[in-house]
Amino acid sequence: MSEIPGPLLAVDKLEVVYQRAITAVQGISLAVPQGRIVGILGTNGAGKTTLLRAISGFHGIDDARVTEGGIRFKGRRIENSEPHRISRAGIALVPERDKAFPNLTVAENLAVPAGPRESTAERRRREERVAQFFPRLADLRHRIAGLLSGGERQMLAIASALVCKPELLLVDELSLGLAPVAVDDLIARLVEIKRELGITVMLVEQSTAVALAVADYSYVLENGRIVLDGDSARLRDHPDIQEFYLGQASGGARRSYRDVKQYRRSRRWYG
């Protein structure tokens, strides 16, 4: 994969508005270098999924639109483009919900993104690639997707995205609802995919510990804005990350980011 000048993905002062009235993200700027894993952290409602859906083009399904700023992929503007055009450009989304067609088998799910014109040789290569990273799915190829476990469905969602041969893989909430052992396995496979295929990964995660364990660089969102960013080691040692997200506040009691922020704001106002 040839190098490109500048970041693979650049988001500049992005604003996304739902139903022409509700601003979900505002003024977000970030860069995703080629060949890296970049984490997007934050609590529920921080704007993480909105950001990913805006990049992938699926925000329009939710009656949302990029109203200010821009998104560049390989130097080209893609904001408010249709999802199929963004997919063809080289971006694939692993969504938080609707990870598979529940009434289709694993093999049928993997054939959907490949399309009806896939040759026998292409199908064989696709199956070999899936078996390389997800041997469990090869064993379950005739299983109905709706009968898979949560971890198996997440594997299937990632494998389906890989069929599209993306340069940038967007993963929304990798660890949501999964047991720690399943999360550890998926993280290892994601790192392997990045290393073996040279794919860049943008990982949206509510679990800060999970994201910082795998990401090279991360951005922290609150209320639709970036409030912190840095490499994983720096963020892991940052007192705000330890207190608000990793539950390492003094006295052992974990407090929410919003509660502490409000407390500090009140102290400045009244003190």
Image: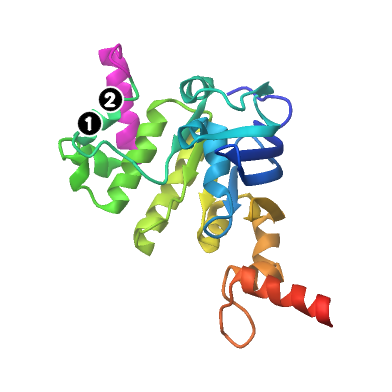
Horizontal and vertical percent position of residue 30: 70, 42
Horizontal side of residue 60 vs 237, given as left or right: left
Question: Quick check: is 235 in the magenta stretch?
Answer: no
* Number of on-image labels: 2
**Is residue 207 shown above or below 65?**
below
Horizontal side of residue 178 vs 26, given as left or right: left
How many residues crowd mark 2 within 10 Å: few (<14), some (14–19), many (20+)?
some
Horizontal and vertical percent position of residue 173: 46, 51
Residue under the image location 61 percent in, 24 percent down: 78
- Write down the quadrant of residue 107 in the picture: top left
Image colouring? rainbow
Q: Quadrant of the N terminus?
A: top right
Mark 2 residue type: Ala
Residue under the image location 40 percent in, 33 percent down: 161
Residue under the image location 46 percent in, 22 percent down: 84
- The residue that disc 2 covers is 111
Residue under the image location 29 percent in, 52 percent down: 150
Q: Which residues are magenta?
A: 115-133
Q: Tell me whether circle 1 and circle 2 mark residues in contact (CB < 8 Å).
A: yes
Assign a secondary structure to mark 1. Answer: helix
Q: Quadrant of the C terminus?
A: bottom right
Q: Which mark is residue 107?
A: 1
